[in-house]
Image (cartoon, rainbow, N blue to C red):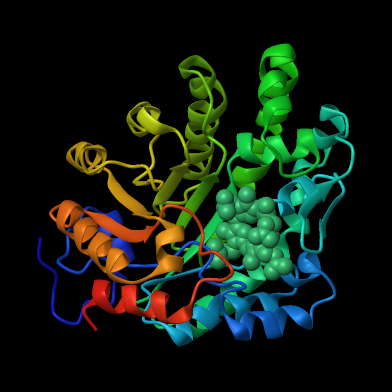
Amino acid sequence: MTSSHGDQTPKLLRALAGEAFDHPPVWFMRQAGRSLPEYRELRSRAKDFIAFCHDPVMAAEATLQPMRRFPLDAAIVFADILLIPRALGQEVWFEAGEGPRLGPLPEIAALADEIEASTGRLADIGETLSRVRAELEPDRALIGFAGAPWTVATYMLEGRGSDRTRARAYAYAHPEKLDALLDVLVESTARYLVMQANSGAQALKLFESWAEGLSEDVFERIVIRPHAAIVEKVRAAGVTVPFIGFPRGAGAQVLNYAEATPVEGVALDTQATAQLGRTLQAQGKTIQGALDNLLLREGGAALDARVEQLLEQWSAGPWIFNLGHGVLPDTPIEHIARVIARVTGR
Ligand code: CP3
């Protein structure tokens, strides 16, 4: 495929439209965050993490910090997947050094009553997106996101990060209740993503961080169906921006996911084989991934070799260079810079 000279369409969007590059577009999950000293400085001035996410000036600054430091092809709005349960009326807070904590799960009917109001309670994130879009160069894309319903539900059910045994058991013990909760999340998430696209997000990513350990029928019911429903609802609202789905840990079920979910991009985790990626590309999907975040932290010759291997194995088709999971807080900045320089050729 060719494009006219001087095309300002961000490379990330061209890749999501099916274009292949010798130097694919690159961004990193958690590129804004504790690996950057300027982030830690900004973070220390916020009252707490949720207040930080709901402050458009601070959140826009956090989103742009990695864009100033590195020649990345995309920014991802600084927010969190747990803002939705909070907007629906469940208590959410972050324990310093530990992670998220949630209060008791409200009745599903009470959550459902808050769907419409929840989008307005998330207006700050729209404001962050418009601020970032106004500052970001036109050839760099802005990504909006939400947690996928099942992953968000695991936190809502368990009250914290966990091994998700209780949430998975709940899928069998209370299927109707889980389906009702997922329905609430599908509806509120679709509205939230429409608002994000209308505020400047040029691609939308669904983070299904906990897609592993599900049998094929359950995966269809609690991962594939909700993702497909969200994409369809967002499309029905007239939004045409591309979607990236990230069913992390899904293994071979990524193929079922790609076939049944109308996303343009499929983000792959660290375990993804070269063959899996090529199969998805041949099926018309743009892939994203899948460098090990531990290797990025370690650096050295092994990191260089793996980056070469990924570029070699996937650059014949459309893809976006990224990690298999987020940047770890203690990752040396030189390692991040080195990989981006190699991928961009700059
Ligand atoms: O990727 C980005 O740079 C955009 C911002 C972003 C954050 N969280 C900021 C954040 C994104 C896309 C997320 C998604 C998210 N949040 C996921 C899905 C992706 C994944 O990592 O699997 C999940 C599971 C969460 C829930 C969450 N938020 C947890 C479990 C934690 C605590 C763990 C930790 O790293 O501290 C968070 C907090 C969080 N979200 C931080 C950041 C930068 C760190 C908080 C801090 O700075 O004090």
Residue closest to the eye, 191 or 54: 54
Query: Quadrant of the rendered structure where residue 187 is?
Result: top right
- The vertical placement of 317 against 59, above or below, is above
Task: Please report the residue visible at 66 percent of the width from the left and 24 percent of the height from the top.
Answer: 168
Residue 180: % across, % down: 72, 24
Q: Residue at x 75, y 57 (%)?
A: 120
Image location of residue 230, percent across then percent down: 53, 38
**Which quadrant does the N terminus fall into?**
bottom left
Q: Give percent across and percent down for residue 129.
A: 58, 70
Does residue 15 appear to the left or right of 115 in the view shown? left
Kindly tell me whether residue 81 is visible in this rendering: no
Instruction: Where is residue 138? Give x, y as percent.
Output: 37, 79
Most distant residue in the left direction:
2
Residue at 39 percent of width and 52 percent of height: 242
Image quarter where ligand 1 lies: bottom right
Residue 297 falls left or right of residue 321: right
> In which quadrant is the C terminus drawn?
bottom left
Splitting the image into 4 quarters, where does residue 139 fall?
Answer: bottom left
The answer to whether any part of residue 144 appears in the image is: yes
Nearer to us in this view, 62 or 125: 62
In the drawing, does residue 233 fall left or right of residue 115? Answer: left
Asked if residue 21 lies left or right of residue 13, the reply is left
> How many numbered discs, if any?
0
Q: Nearer the viewer, residue 165 or 297?
A: 297
On screen, 32 above or below 249? Answer: below
